Image: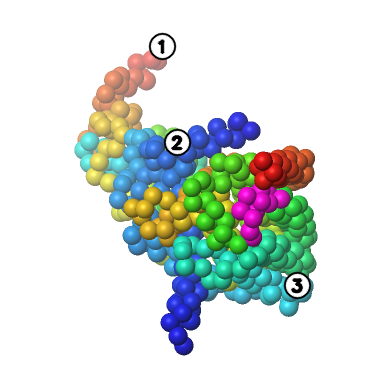
Amino acid sequence: MDDATISHLLITFGVLAGLLLVAPGLIWLERRLLALWQDRYGPNRAGPFGLLVVLADTLKLFFKEDWIPPFADKKVFVLAPAIVVITVLLSFVVIPFAPGIIVADMNIGLLFFLAMSSMGAYSIILGGWSSNNKYALLGSMRGAAQLISYEVFMGLSLMGVVLMTGSFSLIDIVEAQRYQWFIVPQFLGFVIFLIAGIAETHRLPFDIPEAESELIAGFHSEYSGMKFGLFFVGEYIGIMLISSMVTVLFLGGWYGPSFLPPLAWFIIKMFGFIFFFILLRASLPRPRYDQLMEFGWKILLPLSLLNLVVTGGIILWMNTH
Amino acid sequence: MFSIVRSMWLVFLHMFKKRVTIQYPEQKAKLPARWRGRIVLTRDPDMGERCVGCYLCAAACPVDCISLQATQDESGRRYPAFFRINFSRCIFCGYCEEACPTYAIQLIPDFEMGEYNRQNLVYEKQDLLIDSQGKYPGYNYYKVAGMAIQGKEKGAAINEEKPVDIHSLVP
């Protein structure tokens, strides 16, 4: 093996290990931040700042009974939680963390990300369907509708960025933001992508597939033990994915003042959005299902089309003058 | 739309507010003096038991967690032979305290009664009786009641009139 292969392997496994280590840490972070915003302490007993609660949570999940309901479709039931983790982890393949720190620089990077996040919808649908439980089925139906409709303008809102860069490769997109982040010319696209991204990870306030006050736990009502844990890990890696995508597409990726290394800038921006996601959870109530759909199709879709048309028009005009 | 941003901002500002959590084992909550916790039996200022075994507390108890047996000593004072409270049943409602005519049974601000063995929650008289007058210092039932005991005749109590000689009432 030559040096390039070894460093590539190191990056690959480094990214994988980093994600799988940070994802449970996010559970701790979320609980501490929610507590902070609700004037509480959150987990602060086990270990320094309560960090060992992550270990306790994981161990607890491993020791729980791995229950498959007798009425469930066993093969699909087992497969569903794996899909969400696999698709989300695969999406990270195209994300450039810093110059040279990327698993695979594809010229269709952005499309790959969109494809993978669409595949993630299968996990919700299959999980709810195979559970053979009415609440799980309702949750998965809502989840499918939500994910598919928000997918539409999630893709459309990104096209402005693609138009301005002229490439689907995420490295090209970051490098095009060397002097000006796309959040300035593409502010509308940024807002739409952020909202659609929250809906894609079905985080609060768009946690309609889970909606514990209405549907017990929605599509993962019947799951327990590490299968439930996988849904959880998938959700948290999903948060990281959307945060890193926003960073890459709109906030200039690794670019920042040079007193910090590029990787540090990327991580700071990413965690800024993770904080924002948790703040959303702490402050906003869940909309009704039809309100969500109306908001998506009647407001966000026209806005993203408008954004696309205006961006395209300006670029065409600038090219001809 | 504005209200969404506003509520997010207001929640964010809570970051800088004081936390309301009391970190319990290290930091104790301040309990008011009349907080209803562990039940005790108090003594009068002469360190005699206040309880006269009238069963009113046991009758008032909605969960039947008090049981006792009244008896008398040679001086004529009534006292409970045994007094047992099952704290695994007690709901700390305070009805026993309200029912008690002699201020003997009292609820005090203490709740740290955790046990590993359920049987240990059954408190006997020696666990309940304290060497204190509790919330009513200076009160002594036999000093104000009209009942005669050894060393105190009828009419010898505080503010009590001498008993009427019934023969003097004969016309």
**Closer to us: A39 or A304:** A304
Chain ID at mark 1: B
Residue range highlighted in magenta: A156-168
Q: Residues within 10 Å of mark 3 (few under 14, many from 20)?
A: some
- Measured as percent of width and height from the top left, residue B121 is found at 41, 58
The residue that appears at 40% across and 34% down in the rendered structure is B101
The residue that appears at 30% across and 21% down in the rendered structure is B160
> Please, what is the three-letter code of the amino acid marked with disc 1?
Pro
The residue that appears at 70% across and 54% down in the rendered structure is A155
> Please, what is the three-letter code of the amino acid marked with disc 3?
Ala
Q: Quadrant of residue A285?
A: top right
Among all residues in the image, which is located at the extreme top? B171
Marks 1 and 3 on same chain: no
Whether residue B130 sits left or right of residue A138 in the image: it is left
Residue B66 painted magenta? no
**Residue on which disc 3 sits:** A72
**Residue on which disc 2 sits:** B13
User: Comparing marks 1 and 2, which lies closer to the viewer?
Assistant: 2
- Measured as percent of width and height from the top left, residue A241 is found at 57, 59
The vertical placement of A166 against B22, above or below, is below
Residue A167 painted magenta? yes
Q: Residues within 10 Å of mark 2 (few under 14, many from 20)?
A: few
The residue that appears at 47% across and 42% down in the rendered structure is A38
The vertical placement of A28 against A287, above or below, is below
The vertical placement of A73 against A171, above or below, is below
Chain ID at mark 3: A
In this orientation, does residue A262 appear? yes
